Amino acid sequence: MIRQELLCQVRGAESGYSQSQNSREGEKAVSEMNKRWVLASRPEGAPSMENFRFEEAARPQAGEGEVACRTLYLSLDPYMRGRMSAAKSYAAPVAIGEVMTAGTVGVVEESKASGLEPGDVVVAMGGWQSHWTASAKAVKKVNPDAAPLSTRLGILGMPGQTAYCGLMEIGKPKAGETLVVAAASGAVGSVVGQLAKKKGLRAVGVAGGPEKCRVVTEEFGFDACVDHRSPDLDAELAAACPDGIDVYFENVSGRVFTAVFPLLNDFARIPVCGIISHYNDTSLPEGPDRVPALMGAILRKRLTFRGFIVWDLSHLHAEADRNLETWVADGSLSYREDMVEGLEQAPEAFMGLLQGKNLGKLVVHVSDR
Ligand code: NDP
């Protein structure tokens, strides 16, 4: 259904994709091209299909020291909303007409780099496209038999590292404490809560809707999960945290942070990982000036807020990879994937991510190995 809707929208955009649907010859021609989504315009508020354009281009060839790869899986992540904007941030924006940025798992089809052969499976920033090239230094070769390949974009990839490193370095979890994390059924949040449980904390999730809350407690083993759409969010979160909150892993901000804030204990740690509820904002909300209350609490309760980007904590990446791989293999860490079929669905799926439509790590299956 979604696929059909998307095809209609792509046709409406007069993309090369739609022009090749009617003949076998056309399909063959498409398969030999690089299919890609580029940024057509910058969104004001929530992104829409008009901000993306589907294109076909010649497949890129490997230069000296490079590999040419075909995408197997494409990762869709909240940070991409920031790259669509020209606002100053920690990374440069995607330029208009440029391929949308993304982590990918790919198979090497051509290699002019020592140590990499056709057939090798690699992880790299391939972007929203079916074929790409990268220098050997920019790809990470993975053992295709160690774990399902798509997990390299989730629990065994950047989101898993984010959860592990942010929690251990900034959250400093201690047995007996209480941790709260929002977007708790998602790629980062689900790992944060499970790691907290492993460390002996009480783990409380916040998620959107009863089904997500069920998954968080029943599949990920959190002690409790509260629905952020509930009109009684403040009271329900307080009831789920009878001893207050020692670690709040911030993924969302907004209403969830407002509910968390009065429950923070003295010396609480707040790794600020993401603020997804604000990514589509175009201005600051109206309302009372909360700065005095926030600064007063930081002082009185001696709170530690620290923002981080996963690459800031690279000294912990090897430890994170080792532990996460071990715990996924022995079954003591669970994960969920929300797998979308076909590159053409990427914009629709990405827009859904910003509305909470995904359940688990959002991945696009682009081609088979
Ligand atoms: P998820 O898989 O958790 O998907 C995003 C989820 O965010 C949605 O499913 C939804 O869950 C929630 N959400 C979306 N919009 C809102 C909203 N308006 N209010 C409340 N919740 C909302 O994504 P990730 O795990 O990949 O990312 C989680 C956070 O971590 C993001 O903020 C992201 O930017 C950040 N991040 C930061 C990194 C860093 O280096 N600092 C690296 C990776 C991620 P629900 O329906 O449950 O609310």
Image: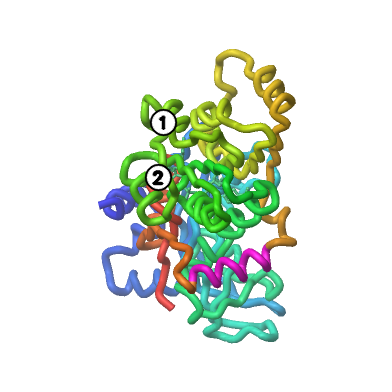
**Mark 1 closeness class: few <14, some 14–19, many ≥20 residues within 10 Å:** some
Quadrant holding the C terminus: bottom left
Q: Residue furthest top?
A: 288
Q: Amino acid at mark 2?
A: Gly
- Identify the element where label 2 is drawn: helix
Would residue 88 be found to the left or right of residue 241 on screen? right
Residue found 57% across the figure and 77% down from its top = 142
- Identify the element where label 1 is drawn: helix
For the question of whether residue 10 can be seen, the reply is yes
Badge 2 is on which residue? 352
Would residue 283 be found to the left or right of residue 115 on screen? left
**Mark 2 closeness class: few <14, some 14–19, many ≥20 residues within 10 Å:** few
The answer to whether residue 220 is above or below residue 292 is below
The answer to whether residue 172 is above or below residue 136 is above
Q: Quadrant location of residue 100? A: bottom right
Percent across and percent down for residue 4 are: 27, 53
Provide the residue span drawn in magenta.
317-328
Q: Amino acid at mark 1?
A: Glu
Main SS class of the magenta portion in the image: helix
256 vs 236, nearest the viewer: 236
The answer to whether residue 363 is above or below residue 27 is above
191 vs 237, nearest the viewer: 237
3D distance between C-alphas at marks 2 and 1: 27 Å
Badge 1 is on which residue? 236
For the question of whether residue 43 can be seen, the reply is no
